[in-house]
Image: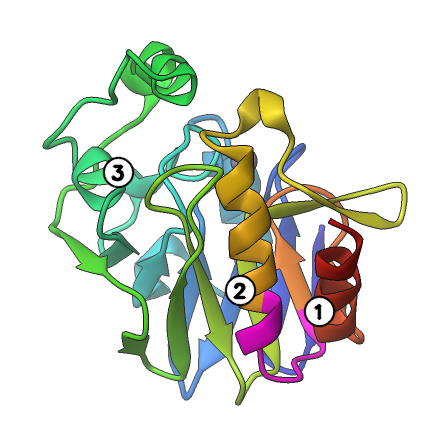
Amino acid sequence: MVTELLDDVWWFDLRGVNAYLAEDDGTVTLIDAGTPISRRPLARELRELGYVFEDIDRVLVTHYDVDHVGTLNRIDAPVYAGAIDAPLVAGDRTPNWRTRKGFTQRLAAPFCPTPDGPVQSVGDGDTIGSFTIHHTPGHTPGHVAYVSEALSVAFVGDLVRESDGNLVASPWLVSDDVGQVRSSIEELASELPAVEALAMGHGIPFNRAGHDRLRELAGRL
Ligand SMILES: [Zn+2]
């Protein structure tokens, strides 16, 4: 089901993982791309808004994990990802199996489709349309958040998640480095403009006072 979070920002609940659509100054932007079995639900959500896959102008990927890159081979549009994760998304590098996170990524790698086109790497402070990129390592080394003050939304991927109405940090089990998760939350909370929506990869996104929720969490860590 599609839920409108704010004007021009929609939440796609793809059964266990979220993706989002934003109309950024007329540009149809998909944020994260679900799992390899999300193609049909994603197509249905797009259709509800009057779109098909071909209408997507760009995809902003928060990080390399199978539940965020699963339909990239279905989308013919530029893909953006954080500099460290981008070669993994592109299929140019394999995950480092010597780290706990890398090992799980390595196991899932055969299920991660690679996009047909190039993957453009983005770094801290870069901008794409109205979005500013914040490097937020911890869940994965190359994890990034995409923040648009104009749309009043922060797409924060798996840096945080919502659970029973609470905002929590990315848990140890699925994180590369929980110390980095904590410092990334603190840094993003201090840099974030006063956006309303906080849109994460798992759980129910907040469409009001998102900035305050993140600051509260940073204060609790
Ligand atoms: Zn995820």
Task: Tell me if mark 2 has few (under 14), some (14-19) or many (20+) residues whose alpha carbon lies within 10 angstroms of its own.
Answer: some
| Residue plotted at (31% across, 42% down) | 72
Q: Which residues are magenta?
A: 189-197
Separation of residues labelled 1 and 2 (CA atoms) = 28 Å
Which residue corresponds to mark 3? 73
Quadrant of residue 69 in the image? Answer: top left
Amino acid type, label 1:
Glu
Disc number at residue 83? none
Q: Nearer the viewer, residue 173 or 80?
A: 173
| Residue plotted at (59% across, 83% down) | 193
Q: Position of residue 66 (x, y in %)?
A: 42, 28
Q: Secondary structure at mark 1?
A: strand
**Of all residues shown, which one is farthest toward the right?**
164
- Queried whether the magenta region covers residue 135, the answer comes back as no
Disc number at residue 4? 1
Judge whether residue 13 can be spotted in this image.
yes
Quadrant of residue 92 in the image? Answer: top left
Q: Position of residue 175 (x, y in %)?
A: 52, 30
The answer to whether marks 1 and 2 mark residues whose Cβ atoms lie closer than 8 Å is no
Which residue corresponds to mark 2? 187
Task: Tell me if mark 1 has few (under 14), some (14-19) or many (20+) residues whose alpha carbon lies within 10 angstroms of its own.
Answer: some
Q: Nearer the viewer, residue 7 or 121?
A: 121
Q: Which badge, 1 or 2, is on the more N-terminal residue?
A: 1
Q: Which badge, 2 or 3, is on the more N-terminal residue?
A: 3
| Horizontal side, residue 113 vs residue 16: left or right | left
Amino acid type, label 2:
Glu
Q: Secondary structure at mark 2?
A: helix
- Quadrant containing ligand 1: top right
